[in-house]
Image (tube, rainbow, N blue to C red):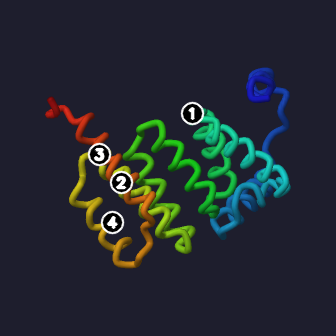
Amino acid sequence: MIPKIIAAIRQGQLDPIDEDKLEQMVNEFVGGKTLHKIAGLPEEGLAKLYETAYYYFQNRRYSESAQAFWVLCQLNSDSGSYLFGLAASLQMLRQYRGALEIYGLALIKDPQSSAKISFQMAECLIMLGKKTEADKIIAVLDKQNALGQDQKKQLVLAQSRSIALSPNSP
């Protein structure tokens, strides 16, 4: 599809942009509408793309899942689920800094999932060697009884992986 659009642009086959329509779209975007609503894309299309992104993630195809979640985030930047999926994909690709940034956005968009998001942020911080910052998050989660035994084990594993990957390790 993209190559066809590029070819049409090069050949001058696209109609000129209606400036009034463009201004209306910009105003809608600035007013808080998401791109998928401005473009009139159906929710079913987003749901199908989410299924695809989730399928890639579940099948450890993290690069593809990151790309699909990125497109979803571009179309609907209000969705905490899309942001979480992108951050989780980046985390699995060991792009911890990027994952932390996106988890931060997900936390703003989906505060009901704060324990789950904060847990993932703590894991990223551990992998970046920022144990003190991670410990602060873990302490808050522990105080709220938001950590299960499996999550505690997962954090211990992340800490040992971080130590093993450290340039100072034997």
Of the two numbered discs 4 and 2 in the rendering, the one whose residue sits closer to the viewer: 2
Give percent across and percent down for residue 141: 38, 71
Of the two numbered discs 3 and 4 in the rendering, the one whose residue sits closer to the viewer: 4
**Residue 79 horizontal side relative to residue 157, left or right:** right
Element class at badge 3: loop
Q: Are marks 4 and 2 in contact (CB under 8 Å)?
A: yes
As measured in the structure, the alpha-carbon distance from the residue carrying label 1 to the one carrying label 3 is 20 Å
The three-letter amino acid code for the residue at tag 1 is: Ser
The three-letter amino acid code for the residue at tag 4 is: Ile
- Identified at 47% across, 36% down, the residue is 93
The residue wearing badge 1 is: 63
The three-letter amino acid code for the residue at tag 2 is: Leu
**Mark closest to the chain's N terminus, 4 or 2:** 4
Question: Which quarter of the image is occupied by the N terminus?
Answer: top right
Among all residues in the image, which is located at the extreme bottom?
A: 144
**What is the crowding at mark 4: few (fewer than 14 residues within 10 Å), some, or many (at least 20)?**
many
**Mark closest to the chain's N terminus, 4 or 1:** 1
**Residue 115 horizontal side relative to residue 73, left or right:** left
The residue wearing badge 4 is: 138
The residue wearing badge 3 is: 128
**Mark closest to the chain's N terminus, 1 or 3:** 1
Of the two numbered discs 2 and 3 in the rendering, the one whose residue sits closer to the viewer: 2
**134 over 54 or under it: above or below:** below
As measured in the structure, the alpha-carbon distance from the residue carrying label 4 to the one carrying label 1 is 28 Å
